[in-house]
Amino acid sequence: MITTMNTLHINGEPIAVTADASTPVLWVLRDNLGLTGTKFGCGIAACGACTVMVDGQAVRSCVLPVGSMAGKRIRTIEGVSASRAGRAVQAAWIALDVAQCGYCQSGQIMSATGLLEQNARPSDAQIVEAMTGNICRCGTYQRIRAAIHRAAESLA
């Protein structure tokens, strides 16, 4: 175990972090920085609960080593409202009462935001493709898709 000091750029702020380079970003966010909106779900990048944005791309933070983050910009659910798409997604989630238990929602919102930042008018097929790997145990997939469409409409 080699502990290193890194400066991470999280939600627009440079933050000094001391952690083993192989530690997943998820645990640095949660344990070192207290950013607990990003959730642990499976630990193998299969469920999407830990989704964050790295340089504008939705990625699974549970398998992403913090040592690979030099020079990259990380955005978490705590910083999602910094983008117009993020605000639109959050507003649509609330308006359509998407969340049921809510556990997966931070990852769902991050993936939806990433989609709309890349494609402001996605089709149903594009939404399904972008959201694949974000599992909702409560089965709110129809509301999620409807909220993404509503957010896209508000961005037009």
Image (cartoon, rainbow, N blue to C red):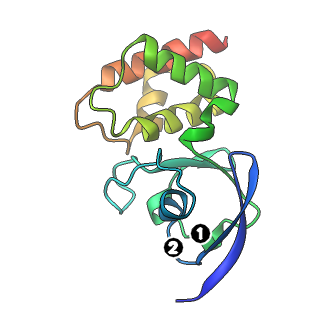
Q: Which residue is mark 2?
A: 23
Find the distance from the CA under tag 1 to the CA under tag 2. 6 Å
Q: Is residue 128 left or right of residue 2?
A: left
User: In which image quadrant can residue 82 be found?
Assistant: top right
Within 10 Å of disc 1 (Cα), the crowding (few <14, some 14-19, many 20+) is many
In this orientation, does residue 122 appear?
A: no
Q: Answer above or below: position of 53 versus 28.
A: above
User: In which image quadrant can residue 134 be found?
Assistant: top left
Q: Is residue 49 left or right of residue 109?
A: left
Q: Which mark is residue 66?
A: 1
Q: Which mark is residue 20?
A: none
Identified by mark 2, the residue type is: Thr
User: In which image quadrant can residue 115 be found?
Assistant: top right
Circles 1 and 2 in contact, beta carbons < 8 Å: yes
The number of discs equals 2
Q: Tell me residue 120's x, y (percent).
A: 63, 22
Within 10 Å of disc 2 (Cα), the crowding (few <14, some 14-19, many 20+) is some
Q: Nearer the viewer, residue 139 or 100?
A: 100
Q: Tell me residue 119's x, y (percent).
A: 63, 28
* Mark positioned earlier in the residue sequence (1 or 2): 2
Q: Answer above or below: position of 2 versus 97.
A: below
Q: In percent of the image, x 69 and y 30: which residue is there?
A: 83
Q: In percent of the image, x 33 and y 53: which residue is there?
A: 41
Identified by mark 1, the residue type is: Val
Q: Answer above or below: position of 129 versus 13.
A: above
Q: Is residue 131 left or right of residue 2?
A: left
At numbered mark 1, what does the secondary structure look like: helix, strand or loop?
helix
Image quadrant containing the C terminus: top right
At numbered mark 2, what does the secondary structure look like: helix, strand or loop?
loop
Q: In percent of the image, x 44 and y 17: which residue is there?
A: 94
